[in-house]
Amino acid sequence: MTYVFHRHTKANYPVAVAGDGPYVIDSTGKRYLDASGGAAVSCLGHSNRHVIEAIKAQLDKIPYAHTSFFTNEPTEQLARHLIERAPAGLNKVYFLSGGSEANETAMKVARQYFVEKGEPQRRHFIARNQSYHGNTLGALAVGGNPGRRELFQPLLINTTHIDPCYAYRHQRQDESIEAYSLRAADTLETAILELGPDSVIGFLAETVVGATLGAVPPTPGYFKRIREICDKYGVLLILDEVMSGMGRTGTLYACKQDGIAPDILTCAKGLGAGYQPIGACLVSGAIFDTIEQGSGFFHHGFTYIGHPTACAGALAVQQVIEQEGLLAKVRDKGSALTERLTHAFGQNPYVGDIRGRGYFQGIELVSDRDSKEPFDPALKIFAKIKAKAMEKGLMCYPGGGTVDGKKGDHVLLAPPFILEDSHLDELIEKLSASLSEVLRSEG
Ligand code: PLP
């Protein structure tokens, strides 16, 4: 009997009782290799002593102090750490308790910026299909995951969605990747013009699309063109790096690899690595200055913003990433993971695409490689793979996003940055066995 309102109300979950590096251990002693960091969260694994000690030390000093009364040392230090490494122009941080809150904050600070700038007529957001920005109503409205939105549609603000940058599905046969990038990005300009350029607040996109599509990176030049279009019409570029940021792709900020800087950037999961719930919204100097020189007050806030213990934990996480050279490791081992996935699944008749950056990789499953036809959604392939992998002691994050209006299946891998070669062997072995057992019976 449980009194917990679990999301899957009928599921019978194992009880997690301990962590050991990249393993989660349940109450029966069974070990699970965490190849997805939960949901791309646990980038340092589950037992990092430096982070645990830093949290305990902060609890001994002061666990919590409300930001209407005080600032606190870990908040200030973490902000400095993030801003000193941030894309050019981002120079203030607002700390939240997770990714949805970070995106709500991004939307509200963007709106307030334009009101204070004297452009109150700007009220539209443009975002992308097959994206996920969170489950609160604002973040859900800009998100483009039909399954998550459907039930709440009447409550959502109107958002214009354009297609994501998704070369596997949308690049034409006779088209170069550069030409595809421009064509995909130019749909933003069309959407801005249709809405009326001076009515648009911002364009919101995941730098690398995570949960809904399964680690789909932008193609070369896509975000450069997006940046140009945003600048042309004074539209803010808001990048959601809740999943892809904080080193997961091999650079602290994923957009560094695209050579652009957004006006607002959100991050969360890997920021605190699951040791504490935390998210962040980084904003440009132009946005902050407009509000500071205007009303001087941001009309937004939560009880736990700038939480000292959460910030102390996240600061320790970021120190470990830097001191242990984990970004270089993610780049290096990420390439090794891509090679191993390609070797193991590249010829599999049900694997349509293998893609990603660093330790953020996705495998898209199809019923037919030539036509790229997804599996019948009723088969719930992704759920069966998750269950089979758990049986074998492997956590991976399969998803059933939509592929051009139809359900599609993918497996998302987002392992802790500390994974060694032996763990990669175990990951590939267990994933291969899980995929082949499920697909053999369903394919
Ligand atoms: N944005 C992206 C890209 C995400 O992947 C997620 C969560 O999966 C969120 C926002 C929402 O974050 P949270 O669940 O911490 O509210």
Image (cartoon, rainbow, N blue to C red):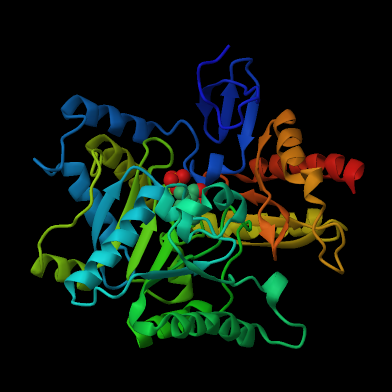
The structure residue drawn at horizontal position 45% and vertical position 85%, both measured from the top left corner, is 193
Check the picture and name the quadrant holding the N terminus.
top right
| Residue 152 as seen in the image, left or right of residue 115 | right
- Residue 415 drawn at (x, y percent): 57, 45
**Residue furthest to the top:** 1
Whether residue 424 is visible to the viewer of this picture, yes or no, is yes
Q: How many marks?
A: 0
Q: Nearer the viewer, residue 273 or 189?
A: 189
Q: Look at 49% across and 41% down and name the residue there.
A: 42
Question: Which of the 4 quarters of the picture holds residue 424?
Answer: top right
Front-most of residues 153 and 319: 153
The residue located at (16%, 28%) in the rendering is 61
Residue reaching furthest front? Answer: 154
- x%, y% of residue 224? 46, 81
- Say whether residue 243 is visible: no
Residue plotted at (35% across, 54% down): 104
177 up-or-down from 162: above or below: below
Coordinates of residue 78 in the picture (x, y in percent) = 25, 49
Quarter occupied by residue 395: top right
Residue 293 sits in quarter: bottom left
- Residue 320: horizontal and vertical position, in percent? 38, 45
